Image: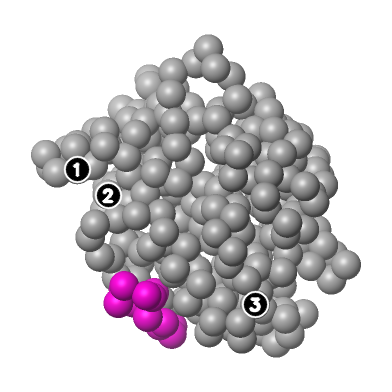
Amino acid sequence: MQKVTSADGTTIAYDRSGTGPAVILVGGGFAERTNPIFVAVAEALSSRFTVYNYDRRGRGDSGDTEPYAVRREIEDLDALIAEAGGSALVFGGSSGGALALEAAHAGSAISRLAVFEPPYVTDGSRPALPSEQEITALVREGRRGDAVELFMVKGADVPAEMIGQLRDQPFWAGMEAVAHTLAYEAAIVGPGPVPADRFASVAVPTLVLVGADSAARMKDAAHAVDAVLPDSRLKTLEGMAHGQVDTEILSAELAAFYAS
């Protein structure tokens, strides 16, 4: 494990592996750098790239500094890019993809960007995603489990009837431990719609990935992101869905795109 210091003094922990052009992996909700998917992707890419797999602020071995702002997370990514030599290839999964897109819009030195299913909502008839304020209020009341439930049901479309079973699982405590960071995901993604006004100016070549077995919401969001980006292409990955990916195939797609 190594650490870099962000602009506001927050320490960001990361693992570095491999040799070659720099690739930075940006996780989504709940994800830490120990997430099995990101560990496997890092291992697969390290034969051709120098891979930086990091804990986003508030998680794992990274620090956190209040008040939160999306800009601070962009600065975290910028600090890693500087550490990597001043520019980098980037992959963002789920809301990590949304963060990477916001960083590209803000002018971060991203040479190529790949995102897997940024979790926007294009269906205006469904309720808005949970807000940063809603999640933060529950955490401050000590209701971390309820914050996780709100995020999962309203944000990740997990059936409400499944939550009781999930609360009894050993991993639930770990989810509660990072409940405060779910407000960060809410701030990044917003109430739902793709921020077309911002993303229309993202000139970074972008690969938008979507699972063939994903829910309609994720497919629609991927198509909407691809439609507003000026230099992007959409790729459907057979047999995959949100949170269910074949890391070998995903890594091969990333490597081919980054090398093109």
At 77% from the left and 47% from the top, the residue drawn is 230
* Percent x, y of residue 125: 53, 12
The residue most toward the left is 141
Label 2, label 3: how far apart the Cα atoms are: 30 Å
CB of mark 2 within 8 Å of CB of mark 1? yes
- Residue type at the position of mark 3: Ser
- Residue identified by numbered label 3: 87
- SS class of the residue under badge 3? loop
Q: Earlier in the sequence, mark 2 or mark 3?
A: 3
- SS class of the residue under badge 1? helix
Q: Residue 138: which quarter of the image?
A: top left
- Residue identified by numbered label 2: 180
Nearer to us of marks 3 and 1 is 3
The answer to whether residue 167 is seen in the rendering is no
* Percent x, y of residue 240: 71, 41
- The range drawn in magenta is 1-12
Q: Earlier in the sequence, mark 2 or mark 1?
A: 1
Q: Nearer the viewer, residue 58 or 250?
A: 58
The answer to whether residue 197 is seen in the rendering is yes
* Percent x, y of residue 11: 34, 77
* Membership of 95 in magenta stretch: no
- Residue identified by numbered label 1: 139
At 65% from the left and 74% from the top, the residue drawn is 88
The residue most toward the right is 260
Label 2, label 1: how far apart the Cα atoms are: 6 Å
Q: Residues within 10 Å of mark 2 (few under 14, many from 20)?
A: many
